[in-house]
Amino acid sequence: MSSETQKTQWAAVRRLFINAVCLLLVNAILGLGLLKLHESRLQYEPWETDSILLRMPSNASYGVAILGTSHAYLFSRFKANHRIVEKALDTPVFNLAMPFGGGVLPERLYLESFFEAGNHAKTLVYFLDPFALYTPEANTGHKFVYYEPLHLDFLWKMARSGFPVRRMFTYVRSKFSVDWIFQQPEAMTAHVASLEGRTISEKRIQERLTSLYPDGMKERNLLIYQKEFLRIAELCRQEGCTLEVVIPPTLLGPEPGAERVLQWLSAIKGTWGFGLHDCCNVMREPQFFYNLDHLNTEGVRHFMGQFLQPILAGRDGA
């Protein structure tokens, strides 16, 4: 084969490659444009969706913002609960808490996005479950990749924070699915069921606690997610936002990781300037819960009026 023929073939290969890359870029741009157009039509209230980014405001001011797992997510995922919270605290509230056991790492990403959008909160209440500092499944393995819109800046945050490539691919791929394109609001109004009159066995409690720690209590994981918590505390410092850490009430009693986590938080709270409130056992009445560790609507009313409102009022009066 002559050198001239080889040059011609290589030129053809280069053209093919360039054309393929250009086609890929055009499709990607078109795809992102269509997704953005679709997203602009998705206007949800907090009780209509699990997504936080779809309802993320811009240049808004709140008296209280909330972080946490599903124990705090339910404060707004039910319409009646959200009204109760804002009435009890007498201020607008934006809830950044996550379902499915949201960990410290994704919560930090949401809080960064909240502040980067020009928003402000006077107080951030972090309902911190100890398992969120031990469980990778609640952090880099969380299900938010399925219900959040595709934002390139958020994808970049995930990449910089060490999310697995497969998880990031799922985040992108799931936006091109029938479920995403044809989603509808999923409004929830209230949760009135309760455990009143039911037997709460120690076996059920232990099974639930075990499910929250599928990887056990590895010190390596704790050290990783402690750093993420400190990044949240630093964000609050930079934004002039008071941080209050609350261990949420459940019927489970102290979690396996509670003692270690509370010792650490107690040791650093003075340096980092946040309040710490262990509410794990403040409500032991089954009528306030719809399962072992989630408040029903009446439980939310009781907790807000009897515990959270006084906590925040005490901080304001300090």
Image (cartoon, rainbow, N blue to C red):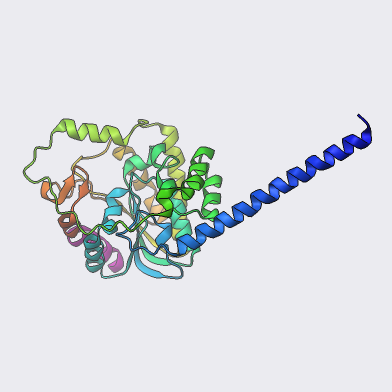
User: Where does the image place residue 155, in percent across and percent down from the top left?
Assistant: 53, 50
- State the image quarter where residue 96 is shown: bottom left
Q: In which quarter of the image is residue 64?
A: bottom left
Q: Is residue 212 visible?
A: yes
Quarter holding the C terminus is bottom left
Q: In this picture, is 15 found above or below 91?
A: above
Q: In this view, does 22 lie above or below 260?
A: below
Q: Which of 97 and 35 is in front in this view?
A: 35
Q: Magenta span has 312?
A: yes
Dominant secondary-structure state across the stretch colored magenta: helix
Nearer to us in this view, 90 or 23: 23
Could you say which is closer to the camera, residue 259 or residue 90?
A: 90
Q: Is residue 247 magenta?
A: no
Number of numbered labels in the structure image: 0
Residue 175 coordinates in the image, percent (x, y): 47, 50
For this orientation, the residue located farthest to the left is 197
Q: Residue 298's quadrant in the figure?
A: bottom left
Q: Residues in magenta?
A: 303-318
Q: Is residue 236 left or right of residue 76?
A: right
Q: Residue at x 50, y 57 (%)?
A: 35
The image shows residue 15, relative to residue 200, as above or below, that is below
> At x 33% / y 40%, what residue is drawn?
131
**Residue 77 point in image, percent of width and height:** 28, 56
Residue 107 visible in rendering: no
In this rendered view, identify the residue nearer to me: 306 or 291. 291
Quadrant showing the N terminus: top right
At a point 30% along the width and 56% down the height, the residue shown is 186
Image coordinates for residue 191, horizontal then vertical, percent = 18, 54
